[in-house]
Amino acid sequence: MTSHGIAQGSSSTNLDPWYHHYADRAAGLSASEVRALFAVASRPEVVSLAGGMPYVSALPSDLIRSAFDRVMIESGPQALQYGSGQGTPALREQILEMMALEGIHGSVDDVVVTTGSQQGLDLVTKLFINPGDVVLAEAPSYVGAIGVFRSYQAEISHIAMDEHGLIPEALRERIASLTAAGKTIKFLYTIPNFHNPAGVTLSWERRLEILEICRSHQILVLEDNPYGLLYFDAPPPQAMRSVDEEGVVYLGSFSKTLAPGFRIGWALAPHAIREKLILANESAILSPSSFSQFVVSEYLRTADWKGQIDTFRGVYRDRRDAMLEGLNEHLPHLNWTVPNGGFYVWLDLPAPLDSKSMLPRAVKELVAYTPGTAFFANGNGRQQMRLSFCYPTPDTIRLGIRRLAAVINGEIELLNTFSQTGQVDVSRRSERVTNPPPDMN
């Protein structure tokens, strides 16, 4: 007989009495470094440059309140009822209108509404991945995607990036090496616009080349695009889905252009994949929230949603500028990306600084960031960090960068004091843009 405090067949203590009952895939479930930061970063005295929370206060509350009231008055019983596993037709029509801004023309029948684009990511992975299958992903990549892929026991193979996004030649080489090793590659996951966490945008020429590479090897492309409409100076190139309807599954979301609390996203998929997505959606949740869909649809029908997105652009542009000004003033010897949209700056540290081990000191100095290790499946990223400019005010961002600079410069000073191998090299390698690190696989 085994006590509840002891894992059966193990000499070590485990507090979970069901430890040996879990499926193998449960081993892929672990708290991300981003999630672990929230408890600390939410303290009011800490300037958090860690989380990617939209600045929802820029959304006038009366726009949502009036949409809410009209839904309850005109469509209350339907909004509070179960709905279709595919989503309401009215909202799917409006989603097509949004995607048209990025060159996408599709059928309302091929849109599947999901509980945030995160669920769309989960559904696609569930449909395609067997344990041991390979997912290709940029280096670095979105932490939430890495968590999903791990949970389905995928092998994640990172592809190098530079300031123009994923490098096609690196993709070719990786596909060749994986194929030679007998691996099964199921899809390429990419965030082409204002990448999370790198902040860079995939060039148009590379989009076409990458699509051709994947097409020639029968590799599906999973295009995740939550930030595409949040550009600052000029819109990014048109979506990859706009030029390949059969080889691309496109994921979109209202979390960044409206509010994440509605938990409404969508997938636009080739017809055959669409059918399976609907079945998987119904199996997972029966249907996405009818109420959220009705309110979002009413907002899109009655509000100047394009004007509101333009307001968000201005808010985030001001915050980006404050972060870049702070970095130029306090850390001019380092390298970082300069995003033209989205939420994030990717910062390089000089060797041998370690963003993960440095974080406790940063929190003690009342500033938080996300270590680069969160965005790699292979342990890389210790000399990088993601800085989010989306939520704090410009003045708070400047304060946070000042505190962060004190931590980084203090670490460099300490290393130089005790180093027996010479001074830490902090010479800046480029004027404005750093290349995200290549994959070491």
Image: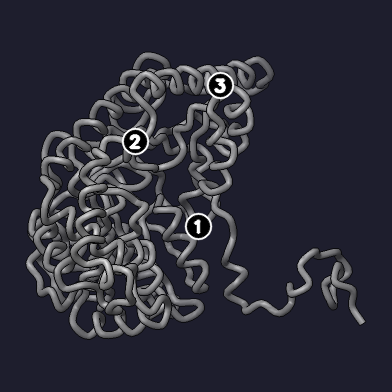
Q: Is 272 left or right of 415, judged from the image as shown?
A: left
Q: Residue 172 is drawn in which quadrant?
A: bottom left
Q: Which of the two marks, 1 or 3, is nearer to us in this view?
A: 3
Q: Which of the two marks, 1 or 2, is nearer to us in this view?
A: 2
Q: Position of residue 93 (x, y in %)?
A: 12, 67
Q: Is 247 left or right of 368, judged from the image as shown?
A: left
Residue at the spot of label 2: 390
Q: Position of residue 414 (x, y in %)?
A: 64, 18
Instruction: Tell me which residue sits at (33%, 56%) in the image.
Output: 262
Instruction: Tell me which residue sits at (63%, 21%) in the image.
Output: 415
- Looking at the picture, does residue 132 appear above or below residue 121? below
Q: Which of the two marks, 2 or 3, is nearer to us in this view?
A: 2
How far apart are the alpha carbons under marks 2 and 3?
22 Å
Q: Secondary structure at mark 3?
A: helix
Q: Position of residue 394 (x, y in %)?
A: 33, 22
Q: Residues within 10 Å of mark 3 (few under 14, many from 20)?
A: many
Asked whether 147 or 420 is in front, the reply is 147
Q: Position of residue 343 (x, y in %)?
A: 32, 39
Please indicate, yes or no, whether residue 121 appears anywhere in the rendered image.
Answer: yes
| Comes first in the chain, label 1 or label 2 | 1
The residue type indicated by label 2 comes to Cys
Q: Residues within 10 Å of mark 1 (few under 14, many from 20)?
A: many
Q: Residues within 10 Å of mark 2 (few under 14, many from 20)?
A: many
Residue at the spot of label 3: 407
Residue at the spot of label 1: 377
Asked whether 59 or 397 is in front, the reply is 59
In this view, the residue farthest toward the front is 73
